[in-house]
């Protein structure tokens, strides 16, 4: 049975992602805070069994210790990043397929924002948990990795089925849309998406998850034709105000 996914707002603009199986077991990806996650699990009458981590940044892992203490949940993260992550019960590497709540989950390399960053793809549920690699109309800053690494990571995600839900780590869509329109001002899909985002935010709604198909039509970073193009627009975004 496919898993259901729900965004859990954390901190000022983060999202953790709650996965729920039909039997009530839950997993969470990137809990930046414990309390909102615990409340979300309680709201669905579930039990937290698994914590998935995409990378080591504090706004993605700060809730882990409290959640483990409360629930005994098993922590899964990248072997290459294990020295910077909370204590892992299962260390994984890109290319592995693991079982989470009874469904297969593919571990994908997604270096660029950080080294050792991974993403989790749930093909049976059409869900991508991508941390800070791919955003709605954006991509992560190159804090540790290179444009070449980020380009490779984005290309890896671009070939996923178009209906795949892009469950990213932050609510950045509004600012990303403003920048994206400076890159592709005549893109009708981008203009429509920017209008949709503006309405969602005005209504106090989340703008994610988006889908791979939507991002392929409107996200200039995912649409970049080569490393040089990605590097150029990433630098421009870093300096955009």
Image (cartoon, rainbow, N blue to C red):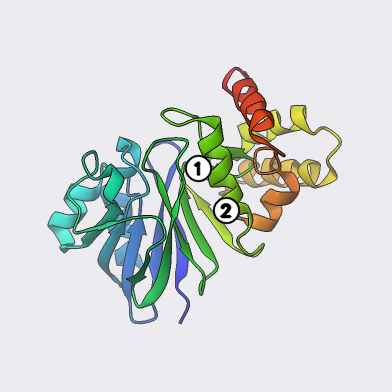
Q: Nearer the viewer, residue 100 or 150?
A: 150
Q: Residues within 10 Å of mark 1 (few under 14, many from 20)?
A: many
Q: Earlier in the sequence, mark 1 or mark 2?
A: 1
Q: CA distance from mark 1 to mark 2?
A: 10 Å
Q: Are marks 1 and 2 in contact (CB under 8 Å)?
A: yes
Q: Is residue 201 above or below residue 8?
A: above
The mark lying in front, picked from 1 and 2, is 2
In terms of image quadrants, where is residue 61? Answer: top left
- Secondary structure under tag 2 reads helix
The quarter of the picture where the C terminus appears is top right
Quarter of the picture containing the N terminus is bottom left
In this rendering, would 211 be left or right of 66?
right
Q: Is residue 202 left or right of residue 95?
A: right
Q: How many marks?
A: 2
Q: Which residue is mark 2?
A: 157
Q: In this rendering, is residue 23 above or below 158?
A: below
Q: Which mark is residue 133?
A: 1
Residue positioned 20% across, 53% down in the render: 88
């Amino acid at each position: 049975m496919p898993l259901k996914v729900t965004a859990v707002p954390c901190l000022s603009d983060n999202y953790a992602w709650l996965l729920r199986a039909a039997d009530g077991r839950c997993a969470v990806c990137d809990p930046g805070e414990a309390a909102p996650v615990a409340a979300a699990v309680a709201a669905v009458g579930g039990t937290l069994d698994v914590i998935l981590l995409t990378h080591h940044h504090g706004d993605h892992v700060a809730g882990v210790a409290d959640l483990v203490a409360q629930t005994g949940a098993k922590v899964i993260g990248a072997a290459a990043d294990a020295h910077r992550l909370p204590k892992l019960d299962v260390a994984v590497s890109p290319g592995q397929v693991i079982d989470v709540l009874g469904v297969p989950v593919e571990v994908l390399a997604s270096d660029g924002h950080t080294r050792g960053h991974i993403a989790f793809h749930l093909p049976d549920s059409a869900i991508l948990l991508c941390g800070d690699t791919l955003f709605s109309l954006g991509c992560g800053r190159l804090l540790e990795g290179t444009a070449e690494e980020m380009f490779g990571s984005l290309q890896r995600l671009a070939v996923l089925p178009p209906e795949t839900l892009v469950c990213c780590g932050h609510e950045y869509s509004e600012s990303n849309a403003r920048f994206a329109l400076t890159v592709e001002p005549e893109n009708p899909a981008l203009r429509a998406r920017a209008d949709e985002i503006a309405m969602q935010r005005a209504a106090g709604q989340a703008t994610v998850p988006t889908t791979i198909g939507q991002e392929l039509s409107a996200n200039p970073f995912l649409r970049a034709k080569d490393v040089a193009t990605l590097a150029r627009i990433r630098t421009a975004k870093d300096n955009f105000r």
